[in-house]
Amino acid sequence: MKRLILILIIIFAFSLSACSGNQAAEMFDTAKFEEVQNNKEHAIQLYEEIIKKYPDSEYAKKAKERLSELKAQK
């Protein structure tokens, strides 16, 4: 079941990023995937990169929220 959910998340992330052409969205989806994979350090790096490269995007706001949560878990 866990594997099926993971596969569905991957498919969903790729389908969203393929349609949008939005680099911030693709990075955000990748960061979320890294969280699912329990690779929090890489997720944090990606969220920080989104904030740096796309500070005015909706994904920067989302990335800040995720960063706060991840850093609080440390």
Image: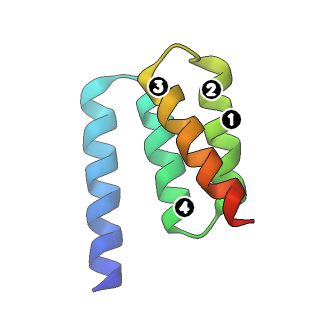
Mark 2 or mark 3, earlier in chain:
3
For label 1, the crowd category at 10 Å Cα-Cα, with few meaning under 14, some 14 to 19 and many 20 or more, is some
Q: Nearer the viewer, mark 2 or mark 3?
A: 2
Mark 2 or mark 4, earlier in chain:
4
The span from disc 3 to disc 1 (Cα, nearest Å) is 14 Å
Image quadrant occupied by the N terminus: bottom left
Tag 3: residue type?
Gln
Q: Is residue 54 above or below residue 73?
A: above
Which residue is painted at 31% across and 68% down in the image?
Answer: 7
For label 4, the crowd category at 10 Å Cα-Cα, with few meaning under 14, some 14 to 19 and many 20 or more, is some
The span from disc 4 to disc 1 (Cα, nearest Å) is 14 Å
Tag 2: residue type?
Ile
Element class at badge 3: helix
Most extreme residue toward the top, as rendered?
56
Circles 2 and 1, Cβ within 8 Å, touching? The answer is yes
Closest to the observer: 16 or 74? 74
| Residue of label 3 | 23
Circles 2 and 3, Cβ within 8 Å, touching? The answer is no
Mark 4 or mark 1, earlier in chain:
4
Element class at badge 1: helix
Q: Is residue 29 above or below residue 39?
A: above
Mark 4 or mark 3, earlier in chain:
3
| Residue of label 1 | 48
| Residue of label 2 | 51
